[in-house]
Amino acid sequence: DVKVTQSSRYLVKRTGEKVFLECVQDMDHENMFWYRQDPGLGLRLIYFSYDVKMKEKGDIPEGYSVSREKKERFSLILESASTNQTSMYLCASSFSDRAYGYTFGSGTRLTVV
Amino acid sequence: EDKVVQSPLSLVVHEGDTVTLNCSYEVTNFRSLLWYKQEKKAPTFLFMLTSSGIEKKSGRLSSILDKKELFSILNITATQTGDSAVYLCAVMEYGNKLVFGAGTILRVKS
C-alpha cells in the first residue's frame, strides 16, 4: 500500500518563524509535489520535483522554498511565516511515466499567529 | 492560463437523490482528467478519464468526458450520507502536473 506521510497533522507557528513541513513516500516515486488548499480556491501548486535535488516552481512559490536531498523526502520551507500562509498543505507523489495522478498525504493544517 | 472550473461550488441534497457535478477545463497539454473525493484528509482517487464518451462506473458513481466541449460530469445516484465530501476535478498535463478546480462541497442529509 502506497504511503505518503506528512510529519505533522496540525501545526501552530508564530509570524516570522522558519517552518519546515516534511513529506516522505515509500513507493520510489520520482515525482513529488506540494500544494496548499484554501476554501473556494481548491488545490494550488507551490513547488514540485521530478528527481533528487531537482525543483520547479509551481503557481504560487512566493514565500516558500523546497528541498529534495533524497528521493523519498520532499520538504517545504516557509522562510518567514506570515498569517496569509495559514492553510492546509498537501504533499503528493507519483511515478513519472503514468497518467494516474497522485497519491496524497493526509495534509498538515498550519496556523500562523 | 490553464484553468479548471467546477460547478456548483456546493449543494445539499437528501439521501436517495441523484446529483451531477460539473467540471470544465481549459488546459494547453491535456493528458487526462481525474476525479477525487476528499473527506477529512487526503483526496482519494475516483476516476481517470482520457477518452471522450466512454463512461467509467464504480458502484453508484459514474463519470464521462467530452474532449470536444472540454468538460466532464460526475454522477452519484441514490446518494447516502457517506457521500458527503468535497469532490475535486483535476486535469493532468503532459509533465504530470495536475491542475485542480476549486471543488464541489456535497452534503447529503438523512
Image: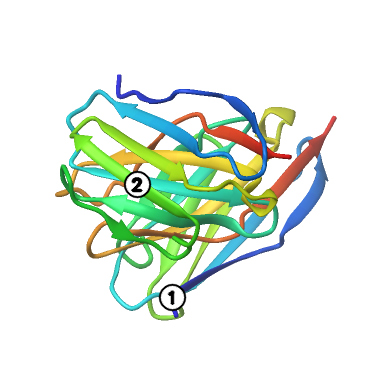
Name the quarter where the C terminus of chain A is drawn: top right
Give the color scheme: rainbow, by chain, secondary structure or one colour. Answer: rainbow
Is residue B46 shown left or right of residue B105? left
Is residue A46 shown left or right of residue B77? left
Q: Residue at x 16, y 42 (%)?
A: A52
Local secondary structure at mark 2: strand
Would you call the spot at circle 1 few (<14 residues within 10 Å), some (14-19), or many (20 or more)? Answer: few
Name the kind of residue labelled 2 in the image. Val
The picture places residue A46, in percent across and down from the top left corner, at 44, 55
Q: How many marks?
A: 2
Label 2 chain ID? A
Q: Nearer the viewer, mark 1 or mark 2?
A: 2
Q: Residue at x 28, y 74 (%)?
A: B29
Quadrant in the picture for residue B74? bottom right
Local secondary structure at mark 1: loop
Q: Residue furthest front?
A: A16
Most foreground residue, A64 or B24: A64
The label shown at residue A66 is 2
Is residue B99 shown left or right of residue B41? left
The picture places residue B19, in percent across and down from the top left corner, at 69, 51
Label 1 chain ID? B
According to the picture, the residue beneath numbered tag 1 turns out to be B2
- Do the residues marked 1 and 2 share a common chain? no
Name the kind of residue labelled 1 in the image. Asp
Quadrant in the picture for residue A76? top left
Most foreground residue, A79 or B107: A79
User: Is residue B18 in view?
Assistant: no
Quadrant in the picture for residue A68? top left
The picture places residue A22, in percent across and down from the top left corner, at 40, 30
Q: Residue at x 30, y 19 (%)?
A: A1
Q: Residue at x 81, y 45 (%)?
A: B13
